[in-house]
Image: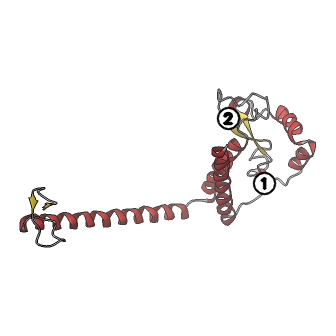
Amino acid sequence: MKKCKVCKSPFEPFNSLQVACGASCALQYVQKEKQKEKQKEQAKLQKESRAWVKVQRERLKSNAQRLNDLQVLVNRYVRQRDSGKPCISCGKPDDGSHQRHASHFRSVGACSSLRFNTLNIHASCAQCNSHRSGNILEYRIGLANRFGPELIDRLECAPVLKRYEREWIERSKKTFRQKLKSQEKQRDAA
């Protein structure tokens, strides 16, 4: 005895492949199966359509939008890299009681060539970065204490302007995504 897939009543099948008790239930069963197949096909098409739209959106982005996307990734990487370290400027501990920013020693406007240089970007408290415009004098002292005065000289002697090409931006985005994943794995393993 088997149970009908449609009406759930018990029946004795003619062969092992029979799933419905009669012709009307078999018709309903076939219609349901066709409907399921149609829904699967529509879901597949929607998924492909969303993927296509995503690719087209990415393709149509301006260089400025790509740079902003990369900056978000770099800032996230810096905040993760410096988690647990105190604010580079004022030394406020990273205890979760205040917001953390990725602060540039040489600002993006002053030196675009160092915009994505992780030696130029360090975690700081929101107070120093936003309200004290980076608290640069204390930032300089914090950099000298952590890395030595040679780094400050290197950062201050860097060329001011740099034009970022689309290919470089895309490679850098992939690189920072990989760095973020490896940092997350290391953090989860610890």
Residue at point 55%, 64% (across, down):
59
Q: Which mark is residue 33?
A: none
Mark 2, residue position: 100
Q: Position of residue 176 (x, y in %)?
A: 67, 55
| Closer to the camera in the image, 179 or 103 | 179
Q: Which mark is residue 113?
A: 1
Q: Is residue 163 left or right of residue 19?
A: right
Q: Secondary structure at mark 2?
A: strand
Q: Position of residue 139 (x, y in %)?
A: 82, 35
Q: Quadrant of the C terminus?
A: top right
Mark 2 residue type: Arg
Residue at point 68%, 32% (across, down):
126
| Closer to the camera in the image, 24 or 19 | 19
Q: Position of residue 99 (x, y in %)?
A: 65, 32
Which of disc 1 and disc 2 is earlier in sequence?
Answer: 2
Mark 1 residue type: Ser
